[in-house]
Structures are given as structure tokens and as C-alpha cells.
Image (spheres, rainbow, N blue to C red):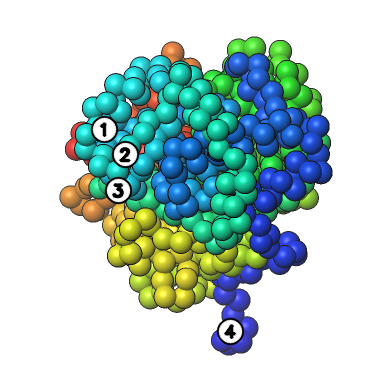
Amino acid sequence: MTVRERELSYAAGSGGGPLLGDTIGENLDRAIAAHPEREALVDVASGRRWTYAEFGRAVDEVALGLLAKGVHKGDRVGIWAVNCPEWVLVQYATARIGAIMVNINPAYRVHELAYVLQQAGIEVLISSIEHKSSDYRRMVEQVRAKARALRDVVYIGDHTWQSLITAGATVPAERLAARRAELSCDDAVNIQYTSGTTGFPKGATLSHHNILNNGFAVGETVGYTEQDRICLPVPFYHCFGMVMGNLAATSHAACMVIPAPSFDAAATLAAVAGERCTSLYGVPTMFIAELDLPDFAAYDLSTLRTGIMAGSPCPVEVMKRVVSEMHMAEVSICYGMTETSPVSTQTRREDDLERRTGTVGRVLPNLEVKLVDPATGLTVERGEPGELCTRGYSVMLGYWQEPERTAEVVDAARWMHTGDLAVMREDGYVQIVGRIKDMIIRGGENVYPREIEEFLYSHPKIADVQVVGVPDETYGEEILACVILRDPASPLTRDELARYCRGRLAHFKVPRYLRILDSFPMTVSGKVRKVELREEFGTKV
């Protein structure tokens, strides 16, 4: 094959029309003006509802309250809360006044909270009071002395929240209008801390332009209009909730439906049925939990047509059930990362089942992707594995106040290096085969855990599986399968698993070790923490 005939793993997205040049506040105003009486936000737990006109007024009340507290353009306002309407109001209010909203993971403990407050220089923190076993007020008091910039804390649900609104009522509306006139779509509007597996997390800094356009593109790809009602059990502190969910909704005047403060499978399906939702979001483990409810068939999900599954690769069999049993014929798979606002590739509405179960779609409009050899940096041929890189409007401004760490992942040509290994097919669709750091090298053979996991999902006794590499003196690494059984009363042995694999997987891909678990260690956003599986079992096999 000559150089001219080679087809490289590069694709540029087209057909999406021009990018939006709005700030988030300006874009929200367009939705309010076009559809003032349509519902914008529903909180099922509290029964509260807002039309777009009411939502706009509520956002402005919070924005004026923040101005009353002396929040300037570029100041950091932290939000440490579970999913609730106030979270959404703060998201749009900070955007209206040019503040930078800092998302804080509700699962953070004291030392993590202290780090984020200090590293981002948060001046005003808006927090839940408590949730489940977390006493947020107590933890804030423990770290307040260490957070030198922090001067005010507002708790959602007590007098401090009402005081914020009351203070805002004394601020002339002209001050808000004047502040909005100072804003650019290229201004930083959001810092999201990535859940690093080693060291402290990094604060991906995102602009109005980054996240508004990405949310809009995701919504366009699934065909959102003002008729859509989107059920959002995914966390708002993550891009999945606040960008792919909230911004995709408001940029199309669709309705955001909050089923519960944190994920609850039954509450989610009840919200879909009760609010006649047309779209449902989730990571694969959420959909598995919903499908496994004993009374799953009792929920009327007939209004669903679409939704988004992302966060981690989806088992083929689970995707088939979502399509057939949840009526989500147009469900979309998205791939991305916080640093890219987040989505780079997505399946399309017209895609057949194979593309929507076997790939993470193709590049979105106005973006580029390429796959490179991690060692040389050269673009690999289609069909060959390489590190996925993405470039375009979605690439973050950088890690907050960490230029050296930014330069480690964003190269001189503005390509974001994801650390994910992928294959680009001849049709331009992308398959994720694993993380560079998750790839197992067994006796010189590269083994991609994703391939083994997909195969093991077909075993009748296996409900969920994660494959990791563990140290081995002979081969360097050996393969460990961590399995959750469908029925704990029906055991599975390693020999039985090996017989199932024999003749269907290459011998070097057959797991040497097996661990039966009740659950996997997870991040709050639903990703399995493979590093913990390696640490826990790497010395015990």
C-alpha cells in the first residue's frame, strides 16, 4: 500500500452549522423569549416547578443575591451539593454575572474539600446542609480556617439561602445588566475537578463557549426540541449533568426533570413515568439497576424515545435491553472527558444497533479527532489502536493555575491527549479499547480489558465484570476478572470460567484469576475505580 492509499485515523466533524457565540445567559434569554410558558425545571422530590419565564426570574434573584455579596467577574463561587433546583439556579446565576462556578463532588471528605477551596480560591461557597451520612455544615466548619479566600457560606434550605435572595432584592436590576454587558463567551465560567487516581485532582477550567456549544451539539444530535422532557439522575457536579443535561435542555427550551437528590433506580423510573419524560440519562450501572428492579415492568416508560448512556463503556446486552424494554430506540452513546467539555464522539439517531452497541459514535460537528501512537505521536492507520486525541472549541482553557499539568495533556497544536486507547473503523466510528494505563502487557502481548469484559458479559452467570492486570513474576502481568454474579446462590469457579473462554478467546486473554464481589468501587459519577481493584487484589492473587 502506498502512502497515498493509506487511510489514517483522523476525522473532522461537519454538518452542525455555525458555533454559538452567546454567553450562557444570552442563550437562556433566547429560550425564555421563545417559550416563556413551557416548563423549564421540575423537582420531583419537592414538587416544585418552574416555567421558563419563572426560571429566568429565579436565576436573576440568585444572580442579584451574589452581586449583593460582592461577587465580581472572575470570582470563584463553589457549589457543594447534591442534585436540587438550587444547584441549577446557581449554575445559571453565576454565568449571568461572570463568576466562575466551581463544582465540588458531594462525596468529598474534609481534606478534599479543603484542597479545592484553597486551590480554586473560592470566596463564596453554596452548600447542602446534609445528605445521607454527610454533615456538610460540620465539614465546612472544620476547614473554614484553612480556606483563606472563603468569606461567606450559604446553605441550601436554611435562612442563609433566603438571606441571599432577600439581599438581592435590594440590588438595582441595572447592576445585573451592566455586569452582563461586560461578559464574553470566551470567559471562564466553570471549574470541574477531575477525579484523579493519584495525587490531588486537577481543576479543568471551561468557558461559556466550551460548554454551551457542547451541550447544544449533544442536544442537536439526539434531536431535542421544546417538546422534550429530560430525566436527569446523573450528578450535576459532573459534565454529564450540567452540560449534557442542563445546557442541552435550555439551549433547546426542553425541560429538566430531577428525579431525586442522588441516584435511586425506583425514583428515576417513577419520574420518567410521572413526568412523561422523553429522554433518560445514565451510566451503564444506573441502567442495569433500573432494569433489575423487581417491579420494572410496572413502570410506564412508553414516552421515552431517546437518552444518553456515557461515563464508561456499556455492555452490549445491557444496551439491547435499554432499546427493547425501555423504549429508547434512539438512545445515544457519548464519549468524552471533563477536559473536552465533555463530548467528542456520539452515536447518531439513525445509527443501527451495531453502531450503537459496538462503538462510541463518530466525531461531533466542529471538532476533530485522531488516534496516535503513544510512543511516536504519529497518527495510526484506521483499524489500529492508538491514543485518542481531540481538538476544537471544546478543549478546556487549561487546568486552573497549573500550566505545567496543562502542558502534559494539551500539546502545542492544541490537541487534548485523552489517555484512552481507541480504534477508528473504516466508517469513522470509534471503539474504545481501554486506558493506556489499564492496558495489560502479558508476556509481551498487549491485552485490552474491554475486549475480555465484553466477552464475559455473555456468560449466563455474570451480571457485571471488570478485568484488570495484576503483577506476575513470569509474565509481568496476569489477568484478573472481578465478577458480580447474577445469582449469588449459583457459584462460578475459575476453572468453569476458563472452560467457557477456551476456544473463544486467545489463550493469553483467558483470565488467570477470578474474584467474586458484591459490588465494585465506584466514583460518584458511576465510573469503576479499576485502580482500587488492582491495589486491593494485586497482592492477594
Callout 3 environment at 10 Å: few (<14), some (14 to 19), or many (20+)? some
| Viewer-nearest of discs 4 and 3 | 3
Q: Which residue is mark 1?
A: 144
Q: Secondary structure at mark 4?
A: loop
Task: Please report whichever mark, 4 or 1, sits nearer to the chain's N-terminal start.
Answer: 4
Mark 3 and mark 4 in contact (Cβ < 8 Å)? no
Task: Please report whichever mark, 1 or 2, sits nearer to the chain's N-terminal start.
Answer: 1
- Answer with the quarter of the image where residue 466 lies: top left
Task: Please report whichever mark, 3 or 1, sits nearer to the chain's N-terminal start.
Answer: 3
| Viewer-nearest of discs 3 and 2 | 2
| Viewer-nearest of discs 4 and 1 | 1
At a point 73% along the width and 61% down the height, the residue shown is 16
Q: Which residue is mark 3?
A: 119
**Numbered tag placed on residue 1 in the rendering:** 4
Q: Which residue is mark 2?
A: 150
Residue 117, image x, y percentages: 31, 41
At a point 53% along the width and 26% down the height, the residue shown is 166
Residue 365, image x, y percentages: 68, 62
Instruction: Tell which of 234 and 249 is nearer to you.
Output: 249
Residue 410 relative to residue 162: left or right: left
Residue 260, image x, y percentages: 56, 21
Q: What amino acid is found at the position of numbered circle 4 in the picture? A: Met
**Numbered tag placed on residue 69 in the rendering:** none
